[in-house]
Amino acid sequence: MTRLATPEDMRAYGARLAARLRPGDLLVLSGPLGAGKTTLVQGIAEGLKVRGPITSPTFVIARVHPSLRQGPPLVHVDAYRLGGDLEVDDLDLDASLEDSVTVVEWGEGLVEGLAEDRLEIHIDREAGDEARIVTLRGVGSRWSDGWSDTPSDPPEE
Ligand SMILES: Nc1ncnc2c1ncn2[C@@H]1O[C@H](COP(=O)(O)OP(=O)(O)OP(=O)(O)O)[C@@H](O)[C@H]1O
Ligand SMILES: [Mg+2]
């Protein structure tokens, strides 16, 4: 569990997390409206050094953000308007998920078909101030090492 007091802290956290990510990774973000999911994705994008901007898509469900270096692209999916199961084909991406880092907002219950291994990231608001609480839960062997809410996450290098 990590407490992040400001949007800048949330982006910095995302950038730290990005340093530990690799191609094929799937991150599932949950949390109420305005929790800070897109803000976290902005930080991940900064850390991965991909082309921005990261916005909240209105009509587009998924966007591919190519790397500005030699790294993996970031696939940003906002499943808010999707019903039912999410199929890779539905996304109509010109990037393969094995080669990308994929982050899905509102993906709970939808993405289980995309990859067995996933990092679930829950963001909650703290009553009374702007702080957010981030909780990580890794599912599958990819995330077996320390990717849970013990004692500092993301795990240090
Ligand atoms: N500690 C914080 N961490 C992240 N965002 C914060 C924080 N404090 C305030 N905010 C603000 O909260 C808002 C979060 O919006 P954001 O679009 O990231 O949330 P979201 O979870 O993606 O929303 P949606 O459910 O609509 O997709 C932003 O305006 C951001 O600046
Ligand atoms: Mg959002």
Image (cartoon, rainbow, N blue to C red):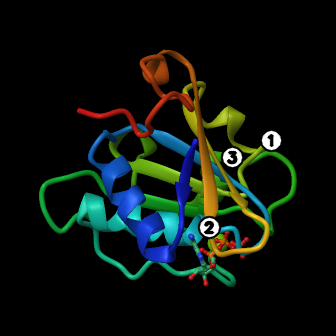
Residue found 13% across the figure and 55% down from its top: 70
Residue found 56% across the figure and 60% down from its top: 92
Q: Position of residue 157 (x, y in %)?
A: 23, 32
Q: Nearer the viewer, residue 34 or 151?
A: 151
Q: Callout 2, which amino acid?
A: Ala
Q: Quadrant of the N terminus?
A: top right
- Say whether disc 1 or disc 3 marks the residue closer to the N-terminus: 3
When asked about the image quadrant of residue 23, the answer is top left
Q: Callout 3, which amino acid?
A: Glu
Q: Secondary structure at mark 1?
A: loop
Q: Callout 1, which amino acid?
A: Gly
Residue tagged by mark 2? 131
The answer to whether the residue labelled 2 contacts the one labelled 3, judged by CB atoms less than 8 Å apart, is no
Residue 41, disc: none
Q: Is mark 1 within 8 Å of ligand 1?
A: no
Residue found 70% across the figure and 34% down from its top: 112
Question: Foreground mark, 2 or 1?
Answer: 2
Pointer 3 local density, CA inside 10 Å: few below 14, some 14–19, many at least 20: few
Q: Position of residue 56 (x, y in %)?
A: 60, 79
Residue tagged by mark 3? 87
Reply above or below: 16 against 92: above
- Say whether disc 2 or disc 1 marks the residue closer to the N-terminus: 1
Left or right placement of residue 112 versus residue 155 in this view? right
Reply above or below: 5 against 109: below
Residue tagged by mark 1? 109
When asked about the image quadrant of residue 117, the answer is top right
